[in-house]
Amino acid sequence: MNNRIAKPLAKDHQPTSRRQVLTRLALIPAVIGTPVLLAGCAGPQVTDYAAQTPKLDLRQYFNGTVDAWGMFTDRSGAVVKRFKVVMDCQWNGNEGVLDEAFTYADGTTQRRIWRLTAGPDGSFTGRADDVIGEATGQTSGNAFRWGYTLALPVDGRTWHVQFDDWMFLMDDQVMVNKAVMSKWGITLGEVTLFFQRRT
């Protein structure tokens, strides 16, 4: 995977040391993913949305070409990275391949290929080259929650960064995704994405 260091979006807003790290972390394309869920963590559960419609069929939605537009915001809420994604999605039974091509606002590009397996009752697992172990997720109603840990090179070291992704189907074409990125239990920032299927 091509992990280039992101440049600040505005020349008059030079990053602090922490901002530089967050800007590098912003290269993570968090599309189709959610972090390892911490046991005992309070908050909404994906089953809370069981009655919500339209019902999300992940294999049906991520099938063919899907476009996405997203941004990474740091802990202060400042936008430090913007990007566009074109996804080529193919399924063969319960096995799916999601090929994601990222183009960032500074002109850099990146690619990630997810290999997903659909399980019973709306469960999914997935692997990618830079994901530690196996990602796990669950659909319920119009929602999908997806968790994984990403191995991210930063300044000669490898950070293991966790994602907690929530996706909500709005209609047949549009889905909204909000992901929280954390390290050592500390929130580093959020990724917001809007997906649209091509007709």
Image: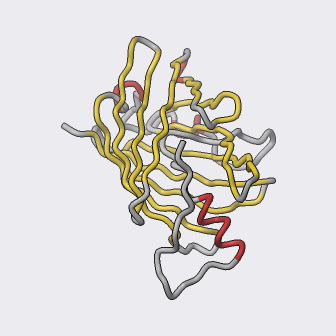
**Toward which corner of the image does residue 106 lie, by quadrant?**
bottom left
Q: Residue at x 36, y 49 (%)?
A: 68
Q: Residue at x 65, y 70 (%)?
A: 20
Q: Residue furthest bottom?
A: 12
**From the viewer's perspective, is 142 left or right of 4?**
left
**Toward which corner of the image does residue 138 lie, by quadrant?**
top right
Which sits in the foreground, 17 or 60? Answer: 17
**From the viewer's perspective, is 55 left or right of 131?**
left
**From the viewer's perspective, is 174 left or right of 160?**
left
Residue 30, compared with residue 50, is above or below; it is below
Q: Residue at x 55, y 24 (%)?
A: 124
**From the viewer's perspective, is 108 left or right of 131?**
left
**Toward which corner of the image does residue 197 lie, by quadrant?**
top left
Q: Residue furthest front?
A: 156
Q: In what quadrant of the picture does the C terminus appear?
A: top left
Q: Residue at x 60, y 41 (%)?
A: 34
Q: In what quadrant of the picture does the N terminus appear?
A: top right
Label tally: 0
> Residue 69: where, in percent of width, then height?
37, 55
Q: Residue furthest left?
A: 199
Which scheme is used to colour this image of the protein?
secondary structure
> Residue 185: where, in percent of width, then height?
79, 54
> Residue 156: where, in percent of width, then height?
73, 54
> Residue 67: where, in percent of width, then height?
31, 45
